[in-house]
Image: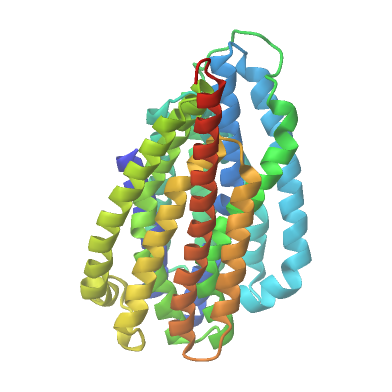
Amino acid sequence: MAAGLGVFGLAGYLFVTLTGRTLTTGEALRATSFYFVVNVVGPGIFFALEQVTSRSVSAAVASGHALRPVVRKMCIGGAALTGAVMAGLLLLSPYLLPKTLFGDWGLFLGVLATPVILAALSIVRGTLGGLQRFSGYAATLMVEGGARIVVVTLLVFAHAPSAWIFGTGYLASSLVAVGAGLLFLRTAPSGGDQRVPGELPLLTKALTALAMASLLAQLLPNLAPLMVNSRLGDDSLVALAFAQAVVVARIPQLAFFPVQTMLLPALTAAVTRGDFGFVKRRILLTLGAVTVLGLIYSVLFVLVGSWVLRVFMATDTSTLTAWVMALLAFGTVVLIGVFAVQPALVAMGHDRTITTAWAIGTAATFGFALLPGDVPMMAAAAQVVGPALTLLVILVSFFRLTNVRRETQRTAVPGR
């Protein structure tokens, strides 16, 4: 998982780096905006489909049900979600196309195709995760990242002049990953009870709640750079520098992704057993590790982040103060804290609580980034304020739920 994610993360980093070095400032900023929008629309929404698929497949395996009816149900739900997202993108096109993608129709068509591609990839990865075939899951990450690196590098050597060409290559690698995942699912178990497990009739509600939460979870960290781009214009070196700094600052968030993916099956099993003490201990241990490593990372990013941006991305960092760099690093650590606790609420089925928490954080991020003042500074501060509020809501809900359920179990035991 670590190796797969390393290749996948490197691919995203190289996409932003090479487009920044190869294209003109305007085209590079278009490519960067496309990168942020695709990550909001794609993983932002469809990670929910992956989580629901993983939870449903795990439940089916544990209860002796066959996978085929479950996956069929997930495909129907995924198709409905895809249609809804594409309709939403069309409704937002009067703002999205001119303000965020700067009138580039090629990039907008790529954004419009993203839901179809990511829906298929999410169901494949969710099935692999639910079966706990993490080697296959990691292979899809490695194949997607590797294909992306190859395609983008070839486009650089071919002197591709436009952002939409790079965007097409970016999405093509996800299609290759779908094919790789399907190869690993050829030997999936096919026997068992052919009826759909009892939790799946709630698919629509669970998927809707988690899709909204996942969308907000991606919108919140990507909102600030998108707003900086729109406020400063498509030829602003400051906006490009801020966007590239955000990409580099988020590297630890990518590194935490496999931990989050592997937490959910174990926590779901513990909730099924009623072992909420295990859930609480595992989350507190994870939060402790995130806190210690996050503080170390924040200091390192302030010290060497500007150097990394100058040397590897040719970024003009003169407009990015040490405070901006520190806020971006700390905001990343807070986000990782949110992702560390969220699987516990998913395992306990409290999807609406997660959605509420991300909605509060996103609203705070949006409002804070609009405040008058230095645009990069206010946007960086917004990247701390919003995630901090989200983490607060999720932590309060987590401790309340685990304490209540443990107390309920104690009172249910005779003689206590």
Where residue 132 sits: x, y (%)? Answer: 44, 25
| Position above or below: 323 against 296 | below
Residue at horizontal 73 percent and vertical 68 percent from the top: 93
Nearer to the camera, 86 or 338: 338
- Is 340 situated left or right of 209 in this image? left
Is residue 204 left or right of 135 when viewed as pictured? right
- Whether 387 is drawn above or below 124: the answer is below
Q: Position of residue 174 (x, y in %)?
A: 51, 46
| Of residues 73 and 12, the one drawn nearer to the viewer in this rendering | 73
Left or right, residue 245 beside residue 274: left
Instruction: Tell me the residue at 60%/77% (across/down).
Output: 367
- Asked if 247 appears above or below 227 in the picture, the reply is above
Q: Check the image and tell me how it is coloured.
A: rainbow
Q: Position of residue 54 (x, y in %)?
A: 55, 31
Image quarter of residue 73: top right
Residue sitting at the far bottom: 373
Locate the N terminus and report the quarter of the image it occupies: top left
Q: Quadrant of residue 23?
A: bottom left
Q: Residue at x 50, y 29 (%)?
A: 268
Q: Residue 29 location, x and y as percent?
A: 49, 76
